[in-house]
Every structure is written in structure tokens, then in C-alpha cells.
Image (spheres, rainbow, N blue to C red):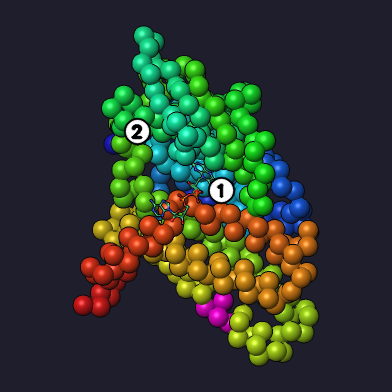
Amino acid sequence: MLDAPRAPGVRHRVTLGKLRDLVREWDRHNDDEAFPAARMKSLHEAGYLSAFADLRDAAQVDDLFQVLRLIGGADLSLGRVFEGHVNAIQLIHAYGSRQQKVALAAELFQGCRFGVWNTDLAGGTWLEPIDRGWILRGSKRFATGAGHIERVLISAALADGAKQLVLVDVAGQPERADNRGWRVRGMRGSQSGLFDFDGMEIAVGALLGAPGDYEREPRFSAGAWRFAAVQLGAVESLLRHWRVHLLASGKAQDPVQRARFGQSVAATRSAASWVSRAARAAEATEPEAVPLVLMTRGVVEDAAFGVMEGAARAVGTAAFFEGSRIDRITRDLSLYLRQPVPDQARDRAAAAWLEADCWGEDAWW
Ligand SMILES: Cc1cc2nc3c(=O)[nH]c(=O)nc-3n(C[C@H](O)[C@H](O)[C@H](O)COP(=O)(O)OP(=O)(O)OC[C@H]3O[C@@H](n4cnc5c(N)ncnc54)[C@H](O)[C@@H]3O)c2cc1C
């Protein structure tokens, strides 16, 4: 596969120091629940928006893991927007034409924000052929960044029902976005409302890859390690706030409080180990990648449930007041954990483990 030419200034290794500085700064101003435009701009200026279109080695996979985790720990809505951006640019890098990759490099250089919108409003989204190309029909829901981001990859059905990826320029079309219904307990800043594509003309060159590419495995299921990493960052952040409370309040002397905290430390550290293993397996397309990632989703979810409940029990009612970081992270995380078909993910993982140990290092038989 041809490599996309690099626009000047596009970097492929990042340092985490700059991001840690940004996170410290964001921590001081964390009561805003609007779309995180300024934070995305900071990530662009520091090179993080363009750094992960292609992951060349295990070190770069680990960089992305750390970046997703740090951003998730700071601001889950920003984490969702950033994760969607990375998903989109990796899909363009994997399936795009040379021309699409050249355009991607130039647009990343300018700071364009990308997303992937797959979830349909009832009725679906589809392509109708016309002389000059295509007309899009239908709308997307859960469209993270609707009205804020510039480019989206959407899935749209062809006449035979196959799903085709289409790269759409949605910049400057705020009238098609509708976030009025995005009245949710958490993740408000992700602005994941509706976007109406009906009647939009699409040039032939906007179709990306072949029909079916979006759901091609192992990328489709294994790519979920990225949102697990974002969620993990929030779980770790909650655990840190919980610890600070125990120390500051003197409750750390209480063995019941300590036991509950210790249990969640173990669950969170274990989840981190699963996400790290899943990330490497996914990006190296190891045979166990899909079951590993599916199992990891459940491990992170369980750690999150334990930490959210434990922090609330330790802190008490103060954790439910506006302005409490524990309240905000819990509201955001409760919703962000609702990713597609969680029961099915756990079931597929368990079924794979019944066949063989999918951890991949020390099979138990
Ligand atoms: C903040 C946020 C941002 C998002 N951004 C985007 C985005 O940018 N692009 C995008 O495409 N999507 C996005 N989504 C959508 C997301 O990827 C999921 O599709 C969505 O969260 C799943 O919604 P759900 O829980 O209602 O449905 P489901 O995944 O259907 O799950 C609901 C429950 O039903 C169960 N279930 C589902 N089907 C079956 C079945 N057949 N049999 C038995 N049980 C079943 C599930 O296991 C689960 O328990 C976003 C979601 C959120 C919360």
C-alpha cells in the first residue's frame, strides 16, 4: 500500500509531557460542558490530531494508548471526540485512495477535525446514483461533534444493502446539525445529536474503499480498544479523586473504607493491563485480537461500575453536587460505557475463551 505523502509538520511520535501540561491546565477549568473546541485546538497545535493516522510499531500503539487514557481522564467528551477523529483518520489511511490520503495529510495540517458516524436514525442512510455521482438520503444520530467538526466518514447503504463508507465535508453546514435533543445526563460536550444528510450531493471520489470495508474484521471489533482506553482514563481519574478524599477526610484510617478502595485499585490496574494487551493485539492483528478486545470491554466496564459505586459510598452525598469532579466523571462515564451491544461483546468473548485461552502468552491447555 502506498504511504500518503507527509504534509510538513505532521509528526508521528508524540511526547506525553505536553499533554500532561494541558491536562493539568484543563483540570483547573473543568465545569464547562460545551463542545471542547479550544481543547481540540490545543491538541492540534501540539501535534496530537495528526500523529496516529498510521501506527507503525508497538511504541506508537503505546503512545496512542497513553494519549487516549490521559485525555479520557481529563474530559470524557473530549475523549469521545478525539477517539472518533483517530478512528476516522485511521480508516482513511487504511482504505483511502492515494488522492484521499494526500487530502487527509493536508487537512490534518490545517487542523480539520474528523469523525465516524455509523448509527442511523430510523429509516437508515443510503446512496442513490445520479449522473454526477450520488445523492445521500437519511440522517445519522449519535453524531458526535455534529455542527462542530469538519469531515465525517459515514456508512450508507447501496442498492444491494451493502454498507459503503462515504467521506463527507460537513464544514459550514450547521443547519443540518440538530443537537436540541442531546439533553443527556453526561457527555453533553460531545454534542452527539442528529445530522441530516438528505439531498446532499456526493462526488464519486468521496466514496472510500469497497462496500463492507467499515465492518471488516478484525479492525471493526478490535478497534474498540480505543474507547476502552478512554473509559479507563476516566476510571483512573475517579480513583484518584476517591483517594484524595479518603486522605483529606481522615477516612483512610477506616478498614472498611480501605478494603473497598483496595478492591477498586486492583480492578482498575487489572483493567489497564487488559487494555494495554488488547491494544497491542489489535494493532498487530494477532489472531486473538477480537476476543481480547471484547473481553477487555467488559473488564473495563466492571472496574468502572466498582469505582463509581465505591467513590459514591466513600464520599457520600458530596459526590452528587454540581461542581464535584466525582459527579461529573460519573455522569459522563455512565453514558460513555453504553457502547454497542455490550451483552453480545461479553458473550462472544466468553465463547472464544471456551475454545481456548485468548490472552496469547501462556495458554492454559
Ligand atoms: C456519547 C456517545 C457518543 C456517540 N457517538 C457516536 C458516533 O460518533 N458515531 C456513531 O456511529 N455512534 C456513536 N454513538 C453510538 C454508540 O456507538 C452506540 O451505538 C450506542 O451508544 C448504543 O446505544 P444503545 O445502548 O441504545 O443500544 P444497544 O447497543 O442496542 O444496547 C442496548 C442494550 O440492548 C442489548 N441488545 C442490543 N441488541 C440486542 C439483541 N439483538 N438481543 C439482545 N440484547 C440486545 C445490548 O447488549 C444492551 O444491553 C455514541 C454513543 C454515545 C453514548
Quick one: SS at disc 2?
A: strand
Residue 361 lies, in percent from the top left, at: 29, 71
Identity of the residue drawn at 37% across and 12% down: 130
Name the residue that disc number 1 marks: 80
* Residue type at the position of mark 1: Arg
Identity of the residue drawn at 71% across and 62% down: 327
Magenta stretch, main secondary structure, is helix
**Of the numbered discs in the image, which one, if any, rests on residue 224?**
none
The answer to whether 2 is drawn above or below residue 356 in the figure is above
Furthest-front residue in this view: 122
Near mark 2 (Cα within 10 A), the count class, few <14, some 14-19 or many ≥20, is many
Residue 354 lies, in percent from the top left, at: 26, 70
Label 1 beta carbon less than 8 Å to ligand 1: yes
Q: Can residue 212 be seen from the camera position used here?
A: yes
**Of the numbered discs in the image, which one, if any, rests on residue 163?**
2
Identity of the residue drawn at 71% across and 85% down: 252
* Residue type at the position of mark 2: Lys
Who comes first in sequence, dot 1 or dot 2? 1
Identity of the residue drawn at 63% across and 65% down: 237
The answer to whether 276 is drawn above or below residue 220 in the figure is below
Q: Which of marks 1 and 2 is in front?
A: 2
Any magenta on residue 270?
no
Residue 71 lies, in percent from the top left, at: 60, 54
Any magenta on residue 264?
yes
Relative to 75, 14 lies left or right: left
* Res. 286 image quadrant: bottom left
- Give the extent of the magenta segment: 262-266
Near mark 1 (Cα within 10 A), the count class, few <14, some 14-19 or many ≥20, is many
The answer to whether 12 is drawn above or below residue 195 in the figure is below
Question: How much space separates mark 1 and mark 2, taking CA atoms?
Answer: 23 Å
* Res. 348 image quadrant: bottom left
Q: Can residue 71 be seen from the camera position used here?
A: no
